């Protein structure tokens, strides 16, 4: 299968490496002046992996889009709309898009597949999402994991699961696109909360954070029309180890450094996602205490311990 992976960052490069490894014809496409693209273009490697010669690296977006049967996008979620303005100039009929980033559009509160619907007719150009746990550092060492592919198009998601599955990644067929997208985005917000607890030497509280965070996101998924049980699947709870505990998690690390008063410069999708989820909670009248606490400390400048104490002083209620 001819696949173009748009985005040459940590995850985009790993996806290109993986899809080549399982026998596809892969092009890796990035922005010409971006340092991550330059590393792959000039040396065929980055800090995480080495590309085989079979992967073509290019900055020619037109070429990458037009050659592909499947177009995988792995960029910062907040740039998807502006990126699609360029991509939608080309004929996209019959191509399949796979979104491999986890976020919610902060301006509108739309899921990323909904943003795509502004640019493509999904009857002619199906859109799928690829979510779940895993780090490039583990995959390149041969450590397997499980992930999910979801889409409104039943035939497309089954095709992708069958084509992409291997002994390195076991894919499951998603059954709830709303839950898959919201759950995947929200785990990054919980990851920032976990990092804040690490930074405060309150790591033992992360178990409660996991339990109550999953319950909170389940309520939001249900309010949006999805199945709340999705929050307990691979898209959200199943991704907690990689996001709430791993030293490689950018979101956890962001929260830890924030709590210590330090700056963390790498992309942490959970920052803007906390703002987007706060908006959705307000729109759908869903109580999101953890999301709100993260939003408050990041955007309103409230005191971290004050937010934690506020959650502990909430009214007594049943667990379920």
Image (cartoon, grey):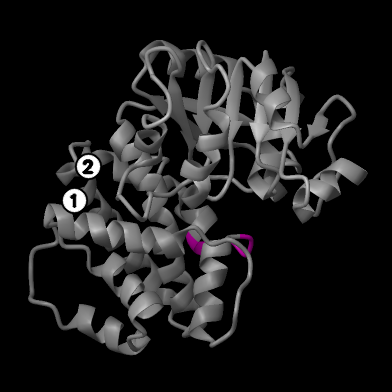
Q: Secondary structure at mark 2?
A: helix
* Majority secondary structure of magenta residues: loop
Question: Residue at (66%, 41%) from the top-left corner?
Answer: 7
Furthest residue in direction front, as rendered: 89
How many other residues sit within 10 Å of disc 1, few (<14), some (14-19) or many (≥20)? some
The image shows a total of numbered marks equal to 2
Residue 307, label in figure? none
How many other residues sit within 10 Å of disc 2, few (<14), some (14-19) or many (≥20)? many
Is 193 located above or below residue 222 in the figure?
A: below
State if disc 2 and disc 1 touch (CB < 8 Å): yes
Question: Residue at (44%, 57%) from the top-left corner?
Answer: 188
Residue 226 appears in the figure: yes
Residue 219, label in figure? 1
User: Could you say which is closer to the camera, residue 60 or residue 145?
Assistant: 60
Question: Residue at (54%, 88%) from the top-left corner?
Answer: 261
Q: Secondary structure at mark 1?
A: helix
Instruction: Give the magenta range.
Output: 244-248
Name the quadrant containing residue 106: bottom left
Question: Residue at (23%, 44%) from the top-left corner?
Answer: 221
Name the quadrant containing residue 44: top right
Residue under label 2? 228
Residue 149: x %, y % from top left: 46, 28
Residue 17 appears in the figure: no
């Amino acid at each position: 299968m001819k696949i173009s992976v748009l985005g040459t960052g940590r995850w985009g490069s790993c996806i290109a490496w993986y899809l080549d490894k399982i026998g596809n014809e892969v092009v890796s496409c990035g922005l010409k002046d971006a340092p991550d693209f330059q590393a792959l273009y000039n040396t065929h490697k980055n800090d995480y992996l080495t590309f085989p010669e079979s992967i073509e690296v290019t900055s020619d977006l037109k070429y990458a889009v037009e050659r592909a049967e499947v177009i995988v996008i792995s960029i910062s979620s907040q740039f998807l709309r502006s990126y699609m303005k360029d991509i939608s100039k080309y004929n996209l009929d019959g191509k399949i898009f796979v979104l491999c980033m986890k976020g919610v559009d902060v301006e509108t509160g739309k899921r990323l597949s909904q943003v795509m619907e502004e640019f493509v007719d999904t009857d002619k150009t199906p859109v799928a999402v690829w979510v779940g746990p895993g780090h490039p550092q583990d995959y390149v060492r041969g450590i397997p994991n499980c992930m999910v592919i979801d889409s409104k198009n039943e035939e497309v998601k089954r095709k992708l699961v069958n084509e992409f599955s291997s002994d390195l990644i076991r894919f499951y067929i998603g059954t709830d696109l709303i839950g898959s997208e919201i759950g995947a985005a929200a785990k990054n917000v919980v990851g920032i909360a976990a990092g804040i607890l690490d930074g405060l030497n309150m790591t033992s509280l992360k178990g409660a954070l996991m339990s109550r965070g999953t319950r909170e996101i389940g309520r939001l998924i249900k309010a949006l029309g999805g199945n709340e049980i999705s929050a307990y699947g691979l898209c959200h709870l199943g991704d907690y180890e990689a996001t709430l505990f791993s030293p490689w998690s950018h979101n956890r690390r962001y929260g830890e450094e924030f709590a210590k008063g330090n700056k963390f410069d790498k992309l942490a999708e959970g920052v803007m996602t906390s703002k987007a989820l706060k908006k959705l909670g307000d729109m759908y009248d869903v109580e999101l205490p953890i999301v709100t606490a993260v939003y408050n400390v990041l955007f309103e400048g409230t005191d971290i311990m004050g937010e934690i104490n506020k959650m502990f002083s909430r009214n007594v209620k049943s667990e379920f």
